[in-house]
Image: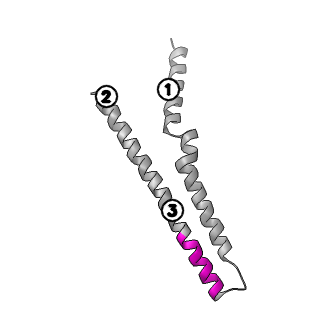
């Protein structure tokens, strides 16, 4: 019974991870499509002021932080880290009150 539960938990985590990765690549793809469009609009209608840089930098920062959330911080402070930390704290509590 417990094996099925753990297996199902792993499956749910794997599905969430795939969904997160897919969301990141969708975000990246949309950003790659929109930035050239914004450059075109800017240079066509207001060529004397290059406001597209603000949008490009903002969108790039958004993609960067999304990347950190999907690939970067999850490895450092992800679910596995939380589980290990909880187990560590519980072990300390058990030692203290024995």
In the image, which residues are magenta?
A: 33-44
> Residue 34 in magenta?
yes
Q: Name which of mark 1 and mark 2 comes first in the sequence.
A: 2
Callout 3 secondary element: helix
Label total for image: 3
**Left or right of 22 on screen, residue 59:** right
Tag 3–tag 2 contact (CB < 8 Å): no
What number is the disc on residue 87? Answer: 1
Q: Secondary structure at mark 2?
A: helix
Q: Main secondary structure of the magenta part?
A: helix
Residue in the foreground of this view, choosing between 89 and 21 = 21
**Residue matched to label 3:** 27
Discs 3, 1 touching: Cβ within 8 Å: no
The residue to which callout 2 is attached is 3
Relative horizontal placement of residue 43, taking residue 83 as reference (left or right): right
Looking at this view, name the residue that lies furthest to the top. Answer: 98
Residue 57 on image: x %, y %: 65, 66
- Label 3 or label 1, whichever lies nearer to me, is 3
Q: Residue at x 38, y 37 (%)?
A: 10
What residue lies at 35% left-to-right and 40% top-to-bottom?
11
| CA distance for labels 3 and 1 | 35 Å
Residue 75 x/y as whole percent: 55, 40
In the picture, residue 32 is in which quadrant? bottom right
Extreme left residue here?
1
60 relative to 13, above or below: below
């Amino acid at each position: 019974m417990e094996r099925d539960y753990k297996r199902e938990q792993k499956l749910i985590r794997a599905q969430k991870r795939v969904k997160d990765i897919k969301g990141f690549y969708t975000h990246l793809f949309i950003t790659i499509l929109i930035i050239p469009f914004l450059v075109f609009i800017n240079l066509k209608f207001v060529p004397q002021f290059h406001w597209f840089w603000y949008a490009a930098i903002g969108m790039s920062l958004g993609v960067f932080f999304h990347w950190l959330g999907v690939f970067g911080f999850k490895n450092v402070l992800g679910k596995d880290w939380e589980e290990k930390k909880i187990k560590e704290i519980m072990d300390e509590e058990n030692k203290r009150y024995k």
